[in-house]
Amino acid sequence: MNEESYVVKFLGISFNLTNVVSGLIAMVIVFCLVWFLSRNLTLRPKGKQNVLEWLIDFTNGIVSTNVPGEQGKRFNLLAFVLFLFIFIANQMGLLVQVIIGGKTLIKSPTSDPMVTMSLALLVLLVSHYFGVAIFGVKGYLVNSYMRPVSFMLPINILEEFTNFLTLAFRLYGNIFAGEVLLTLIGSVAKSHGLVTTVVALPLEMIWQGFSVFIGSIQAYVFVTLSMVYISKKVEVEE
Amino acid sequence: MLSHFVIGAASGLYVGDLLFYAISFIILVALVKHFAWGPVTKMMDQRADKISGDLDYAEKSRNEASELAAKRQAELDKSQTEATTIVTTARQNGEKQRQTIIDQAQSDVTTLKANAQKDIVQERADALKSAQNDVAALSIEIASKIIQKELNATDQKALIDSYIEGLGKQNGAR
């Protein structure tokens, strides 16, 4: 996992080509999936429409438990896309890892801290934006930083940064560790010929299954915590 | 992990990735919204509306049905009372008619009996009268034959009549 990545400079900004390509593939997969699932919609759902509606109900459930009331409805779409994207991104690295010339081109985009930080930043920007849009600047400041009492201000400010970092690194750490271990077991399999391959194969399979589980859980956790942070900004704490 | 992160930091933190992810994620959200989310949620809302509409309709129909049942029950009760009334009236009418017929028959019988009695009396009187006349004629004939004399029938008639009257009275007394 410590392979080098392709880095290109464009307009003085550096792009990690691995993240760009992997992320793009994940997004294309997500779009193709929902596009395929949403063909031939009928009032009486059947087949793939049921799958899509179950997914929507699932993410809507995450939103409505954390952001109750009418306020929550506007975050349904965000939660849905975020969940699907992170889920697909988490599983991608388990299926394919393309390494060309010692440099990784395709892996799980979420096993890179930059990607998870981008996502976390996006979520927090959304939360702050709606905090201001709903309560106005003054109301937003009071509601976000002076609750429950005004001397909590420094802790609340600090919390903004810790929220951001924990949200990003929880996802990154889980997926990255999973892929590191997969690569390690893989290298064990290749190290001493047939014997180690036979030993390592079941281990690899077990760990892959576990990684699928972790990837699903982390997608759920990321979306849930995003909604928790958003609800802190858009709801008045009692 | 640390070395990886340090590598990331050393090469300028890949600010491009951040931009790329932010922009492409927003595009993805827009695409999903346009092609899948919008139609599906619209369909789900429509379904929810339809279900609640159907439930309302079912509720309404059930109320209507129970209303109709109550109305039918009332009609049934009413027709039962009506039937009872009709039967009672018919019975009363029959009774009355029967009484009338019996009365009529009775009066008819009485009249007939009276007429018959009158006829009998009349006939008896007629028979008596004719017998009287016959007896008178016979007596006169006998008498005229016996006596061989000029007996004036008209003169003696009063006498004979008185005899016969006496006989009649004896008969009537008996």
Image (tube, rainbow, N blue to C red):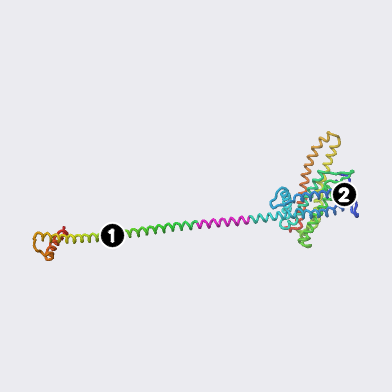
| Residue A229 can be seen in this image | no
Percent position of residue B62, x then y? 58, 55
Q: CA distance from mark 2 to mark 1?
A: 138 Å
Q: Amino acid at mark 1?
A: Leu
Judged left or right of residue A233, residue B130 is left
Chain part drawn in magenta: B55-75
Q: At 51% across and 56% down in the image, what residue appears?
A: B73
Q: Is residue B66 on the magenta stretch?
A: yes
Q: Is residue B35 on the magenta stretch?
A: no
Main SS category, magenta section: helix
| Residue B142 can be seen in this image | yes
Task: Say which residue label 1 marks.
Answer: B112
Q: Residues within 10 Å of mark 1 (few under 14, many from 20)?
A: few
Percent position of residue A168, x then y? 81, 50
Element type where label 2 sits in the image: helix
Which chain does the residue under circle 2 lie in? Answer: A
Q: Residues within 10 Å of mark 2 (few under 14, many from 20)?
A: many
Q: At 69% across and 53% down in the image, what residue appears?
A: A43
Q: Are labels 2 and 1 on one chain?
A: no
Q: Are marks 2 and 1 in contact (CB under 8 Å)?
A: no
Q: Amino acid at mark 2?
A: Leu
Q: Which mark is residue A17?
A: 2
Element type where label 1 sits in the image: helix
Tell which of B96 and A53 is nearer to you. B96
Judged left or right of residue B131, residue A211 is right
Q: Quadrant of residue A182?
A: top right
